Amino acid sequence: MVPTAIDPERGRRMVGLVLYVLGTVLGGVLLQAVFLVPPLFGNNPITAYTAMAAGAALAFPAVLVYMTVPRLLDRYDPEPAWALALAFTWGALGACGFSAPINSVVSALAGEAVGAAVCAPLVEEFFKGLSLFGIFYFWRREFDGVIDGIIYATFAALGFAAVENVIYYARAGHGSVDLTSIFILRGVVTPWAHPLFTSMTGIGFGLSRESTSPWARWLYPLLGYGAAVLLHAIWNGAAVLSAALEVPLVLFLLPLWFLFVVGFLVMVFALVLRRGRIIREHLQDEVLIGTISRDELALVGSAFGQFRARSGPQGKLRGELIAAAARLALSKWHATRAMKGQMRTISFDFIAPLRERIHQIRAELARGAR
């Protein structure tokens, strides 16, 4: 963790926090206006709210299980819990709240097919992507590259999907649709649809963070958003087409889902290995100058280094050491790329404090051992 005294972008972070709070609150108000207020004027509000409560009881415990997967992918340099919570909350309130009224209006005016296959991908991926832009721009120190983009995108999308599932489950719970079938389709078979789509935007911002080309830094997020919209539109379009042809939805979605997921998992696995290699390469000289030992380098460069460090003696301190060393490596990586591109980066400002923090932790570990 970078010492809090070193904060060259404090003003930007405060602006980002204010915008985030305002956006999340407004999104929450819109969400209530679209889904919680109308049942009050219906024939049986008690039944409607009971169905929503049952939907929430199905959706939110499941999403806690889903959260473990991106955390496993983020073993080398775990993102702070507060940043993941911000992304999740924005997805659940901000993105859902702003998307819902737009989707409802377009569906009412242009039809359900246009709303699902055209409007929803454009609008939902835009508002989910705002959380990535916010962390990328206002909390830049917590956004190192492509893996971070995928992790934040996944948490924002899981928040969005959780609230969306509550709505679908509630409708099925007091309608003619079978709730069990909807739960199996959305909660068991395809829970990673939204995370997969939004991860494309996250990859775009991640490539922008890693790039040294000024034009590429703007282009990559746009291309990532375009890919997210395209995948989302194909997915929703398949659902619309299956309904029009009266073909079981599973026959359309499962083959498509298999192609999406296999390709995505192969890509993520390669990116995780790449991050480990980057960390190892940029800590070799730190062994030579005595910042860390070879044994500590082996832990930092291991996908399960955090787990091994925290499960041994003085686990908390050893975990902090692994995290600080990984952050040091990534800061050096960004600094090196910035120098090649003749650009300024705040990563320069973190290198010396991180080395100092590592020395402090090692001293505390030595005292504890004695």
Image: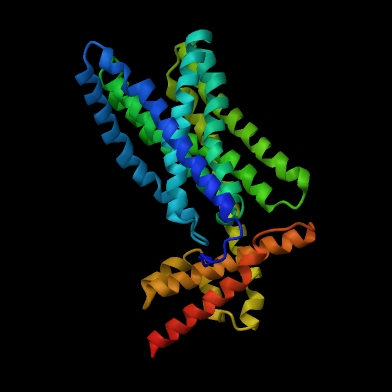
- Residue 152's spot in the image, x, y percent? 51, 46
Toward the front, the furthest residue is: 11
User: Does residue 142 appear to the left or right of 370 in the view shown?
Assistant: right
Residue 303 visible = yes
One can see residue 192 in this view:
no
Q: To which quarter of the image does residue 123 belong?
A: top right
Q: Seen in the image, is 169 located left or right of residue 143?
A: left
- Determine the residue located farthest toward the bottom in the rendered image: 370
Residue 193 versus residue 14: which sits nearer the camera? 14
Rendered location of residue 144, percent (x, y): 60, 55
Q: Is residue 124 above or below residue 83?
A: above
Tell me residue 55's x, y (percent).
Answer: 29, 30
- Would you say 220 lies left or right of 350 here? right
Q: How is the image coloured?
A: rainbow
Viewport quadrant of the C terminus:
bottom left
| Residue visible at 62% across and 34% down in the picture | 225
Residue in the image at 60% along x and 83% along y: 290
Residue under the point 65% across and 40% down: 221
Up-down relation of residue 368 to residue 266 (above or below):
below
